[in-house]
Amino acid sequence: MSANVMPRGRRVLALTVLLALLGAVGALGAAPSRAAASATPGERIAASLRKSPIYVDPSLSSAFPSSVRAGLLKQIHSARVPVYIVVVPLVKGGTWPDGEQLASVVHGYLNRPGVYLAPSDADLSNDIGAYTWPSDPDGLDAAPYHAGDAAQAADLAAGLDESGLPAKFSRCLTLMANGKAVSTYQAEDKALNAESRPTTPAAEPAPTSGGPGAALYAVIAVVTVLIIGEGFLVARRRGKRPSTAPFVTPHSVFTTARNATEAELREVAQQQVIRLGELVEQPSSSGKGDAQVARALDAYEAAGKALDGAAGIPDLAGVLVLTHQGQNAIAAARALEAGQPEPPDRPLCFFSPLHGEGRRDIHWRALGSRQTLDVSACAECADATARHRLPEVLHDRDGDREIPYYEADPGRSVWAATGYGQFGDDLARRIITRGLRPGG
């Protein structure tokens, strides 16, 4: 036997060892792949965004060729705030029903502040939304960026619908950079309103004999144009931003509510109750979010009861609190059904729900009181308390004088008793069982 030939038994042993080693190496290489495959869609998107601020689902990659991505990347790198673009198909009842849920889940995994740009709605797949963390008025959605207004202006811009999502993302980034988001949005909105107004048809001679006559036809024509124009406006505006979270109350609601008369605020509250009613009517697919849906149903019932019995602005503000709770519950239910983490559930500002979400948790002591409260407040109110100043508080009436709502008799005001729901999680049940004024 030649000295260079390995005995057959040793060759078999060596081959066995080699195969074992190759199997081990293969298993090590396959482990990350299996881990990646088990990751949720939100985790996979967040992992991609850690490498590049633009994520495009493979099914939509043809709309974002390399030249388009390069242009958007250049704008993103020039921005003064972190910006992430996430593009996936939005499908009702699917993994991503709307842009707010998509942005919220991805932000939850990525855990980075910034402006998240994404398609806004399954029905308006060519519109975009801007979702910011931290939100207005902490800075990213406030001056000079106004990301939400920039996205709305891009949605309303003439001609951009035909250009597709990349053009709208680019327009949004441009407006954020030049500080003209608000003025541009206002101009686009004004132009859209002007386009929707019907022109008065020219008068025609009245017929000389039977039939409805030209005047009647003219009235029918005007009414038809009005209906079509209003329908167009509603459809376009459904793609506007909202805010600050999936299904949560759009920030524009609070912008309107803060300066509204009682009658105007009642209309805003009524619209939010209707919106919540539409959400709770949508069936659950897996049952995983049933507990959250039940919470949303309680909030809907309580909001309707509060709206019916509302005697002033404090009660109407409470309706917004309840609808906000219900919308948060629906968002949580949808996330659970999709196997995703529940989105953040932020209450409205303790000092006045009309300020919007309470983005900061603070320790606060009312003047003349020794008790310290842990509450959530908007940035403006939180800053005021940090400077030992009284925030802009929502007032209630006590006889002939106005007092901060939380100083009202708890037996007369469920809002004072619960801090608009911040002192516990039973606000809806209290109203359902005992009404707005349990001691009255």
Image (tube, helix red, strand yellow):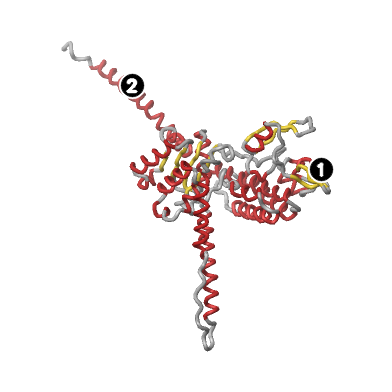
Residue furthest toward the bottom?
A: 209
Q: What kind of residue is marked 1? A: Asp
Question: As displayed, is residue 28 above or below residue 262?
Answer: above
Instruction: For residue 208, say whether it is visible.
Output: yes
* Residue at 77% in and 33% down: 367
Instruction: For residue 297, say whether it is visible.
Output: no
Judge by depth and name the residue closer to the eye, 340 or 76.
76
* Residue at 31% in and 19% down: 17
Residue furthest toward the left?
A: 2
- Of discs 1 and 2, which sits in the foreground? 1
Judge by depth and name the residue closer to the eye, 428 or 178.
178
**Circle nearer the N terminus (1, 2):** 2
Question: As displayed, is residue 113 above or below residue 312?
Answer: above
Provide residue 407's location: percent of width, then percent of height: 79, 40
Provide residue 330's location: percent of width, then percent of height: 60, 46
Circles 1 and 2: CB atoms closer than 8 Å: no
Provide residue 365's location: percent of width, then percent of height: 74, 32
Label 1 residue SS: loop
Q: In this view, does 187 lie to the left or right of 417?
A: left
Judge by depth and name the residue closer to the eye, 341 or 400.
400
Label disc, if present, on residue 21 of the rendered structure: 2
Residue 68: quadrant of the picture = top left
Q: Distance between the residues labelled 1 and 2?
A: 77 Å
Q: What kind of residue is marked 2? A: Leu
Total numbered labels: 2
Which part of the image, by quadrant, shows the N terminus? top left
Label disc, if present, on residue 155 of the rendered structure: none
* Residue at 37% in and 47% down: 63
Q: Name the residue under label 1.
A: 409
Judge by depth and name the residue closer to the eye, 270 or 365.
365
Label 2 residue SS: helix
* Residue at 69% in and 35% down: 375
